[in-house]
Every structure is written in C-alpha cells, then in structure tokens.
Image (cartoon, rainbow, N blue to C red):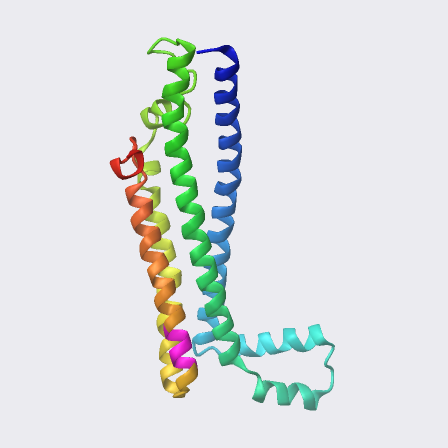
C-alpha cells in the first residue's frame, strides 16, 4: 500500500481514538450524574422530613426569601411531586445518555482493534510486533479479571441507584391518585427501564475480544 494511504489510515485511527477517549469521559460523567440524581430523588422520596426542609431552605436562600411567614408557607406548599417528576425526566435523559455513549465507546474500541490488524498488515510488521495492538491483542492479553468483571459492577451500581428511585416514585404517584402524573411518570419509567436493559445487554455483548458477527457483517 502507498505511503500516503497508510498515513491516511493511521491518522484516521488516531482521530478515532481521540473521539473515543472523549466519549469515554462523557460516559463516565453521565454515570456519575445518573447516580447523584437518582440518589437525591431517593432521599426526597424517603420519609426523612429534614431533607425536604433543607431543600426548601436552600431554595429560599437562593431566591433571597427572608420573611419567616413566606418561608413557612413555602414549607407547606412546596411542589415536591413536580420536582420529583422533573428529576425522573432527568434520570431518563441520563440513562439514555449513558446507554448511547456506552454503545459508541464499545463499538469504537472494537473498530480500533480491527483497524490495528489492517494497519500492521499494510505496514508489513511481524506478527509478534506490539505496534498497533494497544486496543486489540495487547489489551486483551494483559486484561485482569477485575477489568473483565467491571461491566457487571457498573450494571449492578446503576441498578442499585436506579430501581429504588423508580419504584418509590411510582408508589408515591399511585398514593397521590393523580391520574395525569401516574400516566406520565409510568411512561417515563418504562422508557428508562428499556434503556437500562439495553445498556446492560450491550455492555455484556460488546465487551469481547473479537468483533461479533452482527457488527462485522
């Protein structure tokens, strides 16, 4: 292969790696924000009055409300259910974001591993060369058991922080007997669970040392 063509391929490989690295960081941020948002929502759902009071105090301070009567009224009329529904929508968005970025990261790494074999072949490198094996054979050959199990840890953590919030939110909705809120939150919850299932499935399916037939075909 001509030198210019090889340079184009290697430049494309490096650019793909840089894009993948940014997606990896974005996925990690989505994971952290999802855990924090679900945790905050769960705290507000649990029977801990001080949490709601702290929230109202923070909002009153933010808005500059100092009148004790207005603060007291805010304690009574604060729209907590609406806030929780907003948090539910944010959780849905973050779950979708986590799923989509995880898919992109996993597929890109499979793509990089496949490109490395082509680059070595085009450069005429020997089979035992470690050049252009970083995301392929070198990575998989040096992978520890903890690294192999990490996908299960992430799935477990997401499930632990996500499911209690969704369940408690629906229980609260049904207790309020607000038909509109029940329908809306039920739809958002189901969509969130669908994205979680797809996230778990893809995390296990794509975390392999070879390109699955469904992707290579």
Q: Which residues are magenta?
A: 181-186
Residue at image position (48%, 22%) is 9
Vertical relation: 150 (above or below) 211: below
**Along the line of sight, which residue is nearer the eye, 68 or 122?**
122
Provide residue 131's location: percent of width, then percent of height. 43, 16
Please, what is the dominant secondary structure of the magenta stretch?
A: helix
Q: Can residue 182 be found in the magenta stretch?
A: yes
Quadrant assignment for the N terminus: top left
Residue 53 seen in this snapshot = yes
Residue at image position (35%, 25%) is 142
Provide residue 217's location: percent of width, then percent of height. 28, 35
Residue at image position (39%, 8%) is 124
**Given the current orientation, which residue lies at the most extreme left position?**
213
**Along the line of sight, which residue is nearer the eye, 140 or 113?**
113
Vertical relation: 121 (above or below) 63: above
Residue 159 seen in this snapshot = no
Vertical relation: 181 (above or below) 40: below
| In-image side of 155 versus 42 (left or right) | left
| In-image side of 144 versus 85 (left or right) | left
| In-image side of 205 versus 192 (left or right) | left
Vertical relation: 113 (above or below) 101: above
Provide residue 96's location: percent of width, then percent of height. 43, 57
Q: Can residue 185 be found in the magenta stretch?
A: yes
């Amino acid at each position: 292969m001509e030198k210019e063509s090889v340079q184009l391929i290697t430049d494309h490989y490096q650019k793909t790696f840089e894009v993948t690295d940014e997606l990896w960081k974005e996925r990690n941020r989505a994971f952290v924000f999802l855990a924090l948002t679900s945790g905050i929502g769960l705290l507000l759902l649990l029977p801990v009055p001080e949490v709601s009071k702290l929230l109202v105090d923070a909002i009153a301070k933010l808005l500059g409300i100092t009148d004790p009567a207005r603060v007291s009224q805010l304690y009574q009329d604060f729209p907590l259910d609406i806030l929780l529904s907003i948090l539910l929508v944010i959780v849905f968005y973050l779950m979708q974001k986590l799923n989509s970025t995880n898919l992109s990261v996993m597929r890109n790494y499979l793509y990089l591993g496949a490109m490395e074999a082509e680059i070595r072949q085009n450069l005429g490198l020997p089979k035992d060369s470690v050049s252009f094996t970083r995301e392929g054979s070198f990575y998989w050959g040096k992978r520890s058991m903890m690294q192999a199990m990490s996908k299960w840890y992430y799935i477990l953590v997401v499930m632990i922080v996500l499911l209690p919030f969704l369940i408690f939110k629906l229980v609260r909705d049904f207790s309020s007997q607000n038909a509109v809120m029940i329908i809306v939150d039920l739809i958002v919850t189901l969509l969130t669970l669908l994205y979680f299932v797809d996230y778990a499935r893809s995390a296990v399916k794509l975390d392999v040392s070879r390109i699955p037939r469904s992707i290579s075909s």
